[in-house]
Every structure is written in C-alpha cells, then in structure tokens.
Image (cartoon, grey):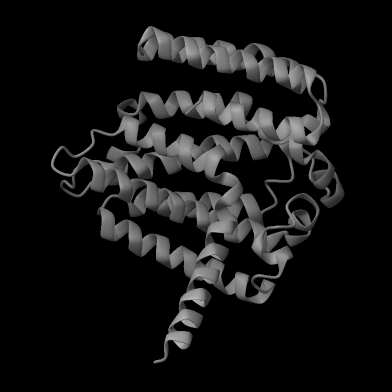
Amino acid sequence: MSTASKMSHLDSMAYHLWTLVLFTWSDFKTTLIPVSVLGVGTAKVCPSSPVSNSVKAVFWLWSILFQFNINNQAWSPEEDAKNKPWRPIPAGRISLRNAKILRWISVVYCCVLSLYFRKAAPIPSLLFTCFVFAYNYLGWDRNGFMKIFMLAYGYPMMALGAVLVAECPGPATSLAEISDWKKYPELIAFSLVIATTVHAQDFQDVDGDREIGRNTVPMMFPILSRLVLLFLVPLWTAFIVVFSGPPMWLGAMYYGLSLVVGVRCVLYWSPKDDAWTNFVYSVSFS
C-alpha cells in the first residue's frame, strides 16, 4: 500500500471518528464532564487500577451518551438544522438513513461494552436504553414536565453506570442490589437537583423548540422559570456543600458559581448568554 493510500485511509478514519465525536460534542461540558466527575467521585475506585478504571468509566459514559444522541438526532434532524447546524446529520457528514442504522448498532454496542467492563454494568445500560426510547419515540421530550422527569431518571442512570465501571470488579450484582438507592445518596441528590433545575439547559433552545412544537418549561413560564433558579441553584449548592464537606475554598467557589448562574438567568436572556449560563450551571454541579 502506497504512502498516499495510507494517508487517505487515515484521513477517512479520522473524518468518521470526528463525526462520532460531533454527535456528542455539545454534551461534553454539560453532561460528559459533570457526570464523569460525579460517577468517578462517588465510586470506590479500584485501588489496583484507579486510572484505568476511571478512563473506562468515562469511555462507557461517552458511549451511552452517544447512544442517546444518535437516537435523538436521527429522530428530529429538523431541530438540529435550526439550533445546531454543525451536527453530523444537518452538516451532511452522515446521511439520515445511515444514522438510523447506526442508532440500532449503538444499542447492541453499549450492551456488549457494558458486559465487557463489568457484569453489573448492562443493567444501568439497558435501563438507560429504556429512557432513550421513551424520551424520543414516545414523545415524552415534547412536554416540559415529562422531559424533566425523564432527565431526572436518565442522568443518575448514567452516573450509576459510571460508578459500577469505576469500581473493582466483584461478584455479579443483582437488579435488587443496584436498585437499593440508599447505597447511592449522592445520586439521589443529583436526581433531585436535575428535577428542579435542569430546565436551565432549555433557555438557549427556545426558538428551535418552538419551531418543532416542543413545549419546554422556559416556554410555559418564561419569567418564573428563571426566577426559581435564582433561589434553587444556590440553595441546592449550599445543601451539597454542607453535607459533602469539601474544603472551605472549594465550597466557596461552587457557591459563587451557583450565584453567577442564578443572577445570569435573571439578567441575561439572549441565546448566546443562555448558552454560557448553561455552561456555568453544568460546572457548578460537577
């Protein structure tokens, strides 16, 4: 094989790998990083291979996130054409037909990957797959309150999977053991935070959501939905800081970020400002 041919193959591989990354790119700072920090931080990371298991947990989380995004973006490409035209389908990097094929492959891939990493990991993987289909194909993302309910279930499920992958492999874990949420108080708190504040992510997409008929909380309550964040985000942050007991400087930093989120929600309303507020919001709970 000539050097030119090798370079062509490498360029093609890099192109397709970057296409896969672009499916999840907008969720790196809002989901992948915060949930990775929560999952790995909650887990009793295996002392014999802390770095390796942590990397596996992050990769597992990215794979699950890819499954969600490929399903979401293949189901409603018109939304991305309005809100995020750089994503693979509206940008023409992959056809809609191939994206629909890839979404089914992603389900099998995530199950196999989960089983490879840890015997217990397929349980949150399959439960998250149920969330993906309910969210996208039953239309539950179209109602603002149902969307919040689903996200309050989906986010902790991702974090739970990251916890299981980061921990040392052990005996097979039953569904009953994994369902014992008393073992994961951090994930319970995370679910409640999501349920009451995650609509902060919807402000930046109001125009596109309105165009496709989605009715989010910021559209139903444009003023009230911003005002509640001015109080709830600092309140939740104070609760987490008190009960987790971080160093004083770290607690003060997170509380300061929560105040920035609350104030920005009330004072800055443009889509660009809302995107930055969403970024700070994600950092404040990571």
Q: Residue at x 48, y 74 (%)?
A: 13
Image coordinates for residue 139, horizontal then vertical, percent = 70, 51
Image coordinates for residue 152, horizontal then vertical, percent = 55, 34
Q: Residue at x 73, y 64 (%)?
A: 90
The reply, left or right, for residue 180 in relation to residue 145 is left
On the image, which quarter does residue 159 sit in? Answer: top left
The reply, left or right, for residue 23 in relation to residue 3 is right
Image coordinates for residue 227, horizontal then vertical, percent = 74, 15
Residue 217 visible in the displayed image: no
Q: Is residue 9 above or below residue 23?
A: below
Q: What quarter of the picture does the N terminus occupy?
A: bottom left
Q: Residue at x 80, y 39 (%)?
A: 206
Q: Residue at x 75, y 30 (%)?
A: 273
Q: Is residue 196 above or below residue 263?
A: below
On the image, which quarter does residue 195 sit in? Answer: top right
Image coordinates for residue 56, horizontal then vertical, percent = 31, 50
Q: Which residue is at the far bottom?
A: 1
